[in-house]
Image: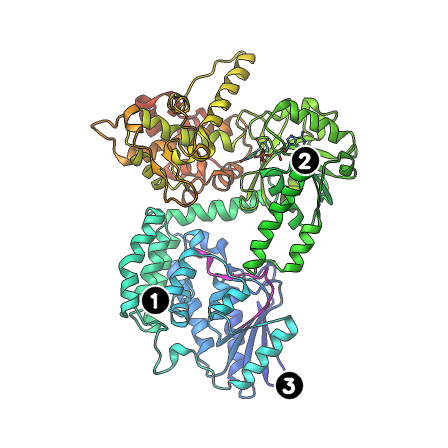
Amino acid sequence: MASAVTVEIGADGIAVASMDLPGRPMNVVGDALMSGIGQATDALADATVKGLILTSSKADFCAGGDLDAISQWTRPEQAFDVTMAMKAVLRRLETQGKPVVAAINGHALGGGLEIALACHARFVIDDPKLRIGQPEVKLGLLPGGGGTVRLSRLLGIQQTLKIIGEGNDLTPREAKAMGLVTDLAADRAELLAKARAWIAASPKAQQPWDAPKFRFPGGDSRSPAALQLLAIAPSIASARSWGNYPAVQHIMSAVFEGGLLDFDAACEVESRYFAACAMSQQSRNLIAAMWYQLNAVRKGASRPAGIAASKVGKLGILGAGMMGSGIAYVSARAGIDVVLLDTTRDAAERGKAHAQALLDKAVAKGRVSSKARDGVLSRIAPTTRYEDLAGCELVIEAVFEDRAVKADVTKRAEAVIPAQALLASNTSTLPITNLARASVRPANFLGLHFFSPVGKMPLVEIIVGAQTSDEALARGFDFVLQIGKTPIVVNDSRGFYTSRVFATYVMEGIAMLAEGVHPRSIEVAGLQAGMPMPPLALQDEVSLSLALHVVEQTRKDMAVEGQTYREHPAIAVIRKLCEIGRVGKKAGKGFYDWPGESSGEKRLWPGLAQYWPPAAQQPEQRELIDRLRFAQANEAARCYEEGVVRSVADANVGSILGWGFAPFQGGALQFINAMGVRRFVERSRELAERFGARFAPATIVVRQAEAGSAFAD
Ligand code: NAD
């Protein structure tokens, strides 16, 4: 097999080593790449070779660790040995006494950045789309190739904890500003020219940490600044993660302990903590959901096969409110021409102004150039005239949540758009099959359920109505990918998938209040369960009156269908609060008192105790956490059983990206798998006995427990 790194020695005595892992679209760190780098290092032994430039022939520099390999490990020794071997290769590269320069032509992430850190200088192409960083923590890991050791010696302990502990990517300019890279280059030619010039000017390059008088920038772990940080950083981190992300603690240990040790010992300590991360259930869950399942979802596992790929060139949006303007923004950023229609010119212009505000912010942060901003804005055409929709391949309806208004705009749009165009509703609650009745071509009608704020939320739920064709679904799917979002496919049913399962979390929290659980314990349990927001605060954000409105609508709809609505115990609480005018954040009062803009933090309303006095005997926190998690997992299982959600990957990925279900659990169904289906069934039965039939385990899980199987696609 061809080597993963090819080396060419130029007439100037500079060797250019290009990483190009055979058979893979990106360079990933593994045996093949590391042995290629080892061979490139050998080139430095030649007395005529003056130095080495390490770059890549692929679009990226190096995307990070080989997760396929990592997921195969079963013993911590494997993780330890592999990372120690990687470190030996990189150590040899940086200690040959000759200059080695990383010429970073594309993304340098995770192990890719660690390779670059083992070079004496780093030059990067100044492309705002290029990303540099150590995102391992997002998969429950830490950099195992010397990243904690070299970064802390290059930038200091505090900066390192930020980069590795938060895992956020940097643009080339951000990396330059913090001293992570030596300089920027306009293009590939300049990149190589600067690297060559650096080598020529630094014939005896040495890493700062190998100099006899080396000191950590800002001091090592014994310095007063580091000791102060050490005293508070772990508690701040666990206050944020509630102890659910062991990688965060391991990162701190590796960095602080590494800051007391010599280079080689620090490398060994890092590998031990890496092994602990790699063996953790949290990391396995994160890799399964946020890597394998997310990739499967994005590669189209739920997209009907055999339908040609499509692209939208011109998009119509009906309603330029909060959702419509957000959809216009993300679509125009993806290069699509957008016609943004509202009832008045002012409203349509306001929608465009929303996109402008978001783009201005991105320009100020250096993440978008002003030229690119102007280009995006020129693609959004505000209007009040339906004729302007002519030629749209897709129209998304985002007007008020009202059947009659939606039916009216559907008819008017369909009168002008091409016969084969799609019409998608962004409704959050109305069944798509019903809305499609207003359409003259229901096969082309579907739901595209975006989340708010559209610019940030990565998921779109595609809702398939009774008459939606496979072709329409496939084209909707392609559009969601085109705008850089992740599509999951959901069958038409009340609450679809995400709203239905998410509601069980909030409702369970509210039901606890009615039972006399102290509201603060409820809120803390939500965060301990790994949810991004506690249940009572969330209901305030969403609005209590809206929840009540949806309940009443559901009750009516079910009566029409001859079904009886079973009221959740939380509803009585919501009704009571609405009666006394505490309808949520918009009103400044709900479960919380919400101060205006400037007057401080929200506070739980003390009056809750008058209506729902806390019981003398409070339940264990463990039980509250279980209830919040089981309520969601069980409902997700029911959705899968009923075919509301069609695949395990969609269910897991949708739960994490849609409503923030604890990512370290790997998603709502993986939660059941990881704890063991039998245990889940037993505990669900206990909870059902004490708190009601809503906890009775879904039939599918009971069957799996009997058969010894689990959720799998
Ligand atoms: P919004 O009130 O902010 O915006 C609705 C817009 O539609 C307004 O600008 C209004 O002028 C316009 N409009 C009303 N009637 C119209 C008509 N006949 N023709 C053209 N424009 C008309 O509402 P929103 O929050 O953007 O919600 C829009 C839709 O998206 C609703 O169906 C809602 O259920 C759904 N949705 C909302 C959220 C959310 O978090 N807000 C999330 C997902 C889905």
Badge 3 crowding class, 10 Å Cα cut-off, few under 14, some 14 to 19, many 20 or more, is few
Q: Residue at x 54, y 38 (%)?
A: 451
Nearer-N-terminus badge (2/3): 3
Residue tagged 1? 268
Q: Tag 3's secondary structure?
A: loop
Q: Amino acid at mark 3?
A: Ala
Residue tagged 2? 342
Task: Say which of 40 and 346 sits in front.
Answer: 346
Label tally = 3
Q: Is residue 227 above or below residue 349?
A: below
Tell me: 264 left or right of 652: left
Q: Is mark 3 within 8 Å of ligand 1?
A: no
Q: Amino acid at mark 2?
A: Asp
Tell me: 651 left or right of 128: left
Q: Tag 1's secondary structure?
A: helix
Task: Say which of 285 and 258 sits in front.
Answer: 258
Badge 1 crowding class, 10 Å Cα cut-off, few under 14, some 14 to 19, many 20 or more, is many
* Visible residue check, residue 519: yes
Q: Is residue 42 magenta?
A: no
Q: CA distance from mark 2 to mark 3?
A: 65 Å
Q: Is residue 101 above or below residue 340?
A: below
Q: CA distance from mark 1 to mark 2?
A: 62 Å
Q: Tell me where residue 610 appears, x and y as whole percent.
A: 28, 25
Nearer-N-terminus badge (3/1): 3
Q: Residue furthest left?
A: 616
Tell me: 708 left or right of 121: left
Residue tagged 3? 11
- Magenta stretch in the rendered image: 123-136
